[in-house]
Amino acid sequence: MIAIIDYGVGNLFSLQSSFAALGVQAVATRDAAVIRSADRLILPGVGAFADAAEKLRATGMDTLVCDAAAAGKPLLGICLGMQLLFDTSYEYGVHKGLGLLRGSIRPIADVIPAGLKIPQIGWNALQIQKETPLFKYISNGDHVYFVHSYYAADCGDALAATVEYGAPLTAAVADGNVFGCQFHPEKSGDVGLSILRAFCETEVPA
Amino acid sequence: MITKRIIPCLDVKNGRVVKGVNFEGLGDVASPVALAEYYSRCGADELVFYDITASAEGRALFTDILCETARRVFIPLTVGGGINTVDDFDRVLKCGADKVSVNSGAIRDPALVEAAAKRYGDQCVVLSVDIKRVDGAFRVFAKGGRENTGMEAIGWIKRCVAMGAGEIVVNSIDTDGVKQGFDLEMLAAVCQAVSVPVIASGGAGRIEDFITLFQTLPQVDAGLAASIFHFGEVAIRDLKAAMAAAGIPARL
């Protein structure tokens, strides 16, 4: 069973629908027992980093997510949920994330040329940087749907895919059992569903 | 490169798509869910569901249809029509909409744009504007283009962007239904004024109109149309292929 962490940030309807379409059992929950019994975790999120990080801590979800990751359970952060996996964010101040991945969240305005619109909204091509189980069913250049004004910088070896928006920006990360997508797989048509399917097939600890 | 988006708009009344729909191989052509699935398969980048129902029953039916669509179609969904309060945002977002488009509701109460952007983020709030030239000036029209508000359009759009509107749909009443191409002059004026994504609407009659749009105004992010897609006058697959062949970034 997949637990979609419900900590009051964003809309989980499409994410739940995606797993239903894949025939995979997924529940949106903030129940610690359910999260502990899940095989895999999804950390969703839209909105502001500081607000979401605060809600994660206030609901105690931060510890549950970190415990699951430490136990080797596959964890997928989506959009802001991916950004929360990192050490630090520089979105309106300096804020601490979950620290599961090295790197920091910075404004795309720092690296893209002036004149490009912020946020990046729309479909853009994935430039695969390394093999990861997440990309089992997709190809380099496949399009996915982005909505973001910040990106993960200095991800090191975790960098799995970039997207070209005036500069190469982090599109996906993978480090062992911890995965993240800056784009919305639940809004990225068949390509997105294929990524979610691949996540459902990643190995879980015995 | 980020691709230029092609967005079919479905007008829904009492649970059915209005404006005739004419496709081979599509069973229930008036079913918004079936049509949405069909467009998604054909390569539509996003869908707009426009609720033109007046009754409460129709509204409930609309949200049912929206939920059913979001269960089956995994591309961004924008909902418009009858959005007057933050509660209206809530109602459609819960059913799987990603963005909500406001038009007359924002004219009646501009604070709606700010309140919704604060609660759901700028990316969620789409400002739709019906614009018509009156004595050479761009004026905002309300109530589906029937009523001149007297407001100057560019100023109105800038004001809404400052309040948090994350995208602008520019619907030119002057070119709407004429099928002679998008209103490039009006769109250029809007693109010059704001830095959020601009979606062109009104006037497309053939594939070449989209090519001209994106080549003349690379700042425009998306093209929206309704009947030319519904009647099969423009097939989305052919349109995407033609865009790619013309060097316009497109998701095939």
Image: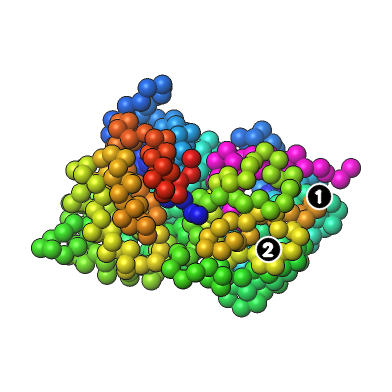
Kindly identify which chain the residue marked by label 2 belongs to. Answer: A
Residue at coordinates 49% horizontally, 63% vertically from top-left?
A: A119
Given residues A79 and A10, the one toward you in this image is A79
Q: Is residue B217 above or below residue A22?
A: below
Q: Give the range drawn in magenta.
A: A181-206
Number of marks in the image?
A: 2
Q: Which amino acid does label 2 sit on?
A: Leu
The answer to whether residue A100 is left or right of residue B167 is right
- Lower position in the chain sequence, tag 1 or tag 2: 1
Given residues B18 and B240, the one toward you in this image is B240
Kindly identify which chain the residue marked by label 1 belongs to. Answer: A
CB atoms of marks 1 and 2 within 8 Å: no
Q: Mark 1 points at which residue?
A: A73
Rendering coords of residue B247 (x, y %):
42, 48
Question: Which quadrant does the N terminus of chain A fall into?
Answer: top right
Q: Mark 2 points at which residue?
A: A84
**Label 2: which secondary element:** loop
Q: Is residue A174 above or below residue A111?
A: above
Residue at coordinates 35% horizontally, 48% vertically from top-left?
A: B223
Rendering coords of residue A87 (x, y %):
73, 69
Labels 1 and 2 share a subunit: yes
Residue at coordinates 67% horizontally, 74% vertically from top-left?
A: A95
The answer to whether residue A13 is left or right of residue B251 is right
Q: Which colour scheme is used?
A: rainbow
Q: What crowding class fits label 2: few (fewer than 14 Cα within 10 Å), some (14-19), or many (20 or more)?
A: many
Rendering coords of residue B181 (x, y %):
24, 46
**Label 1: which secondary element:** loop
Q: Is residue A52 above or below residue B15?
A: below
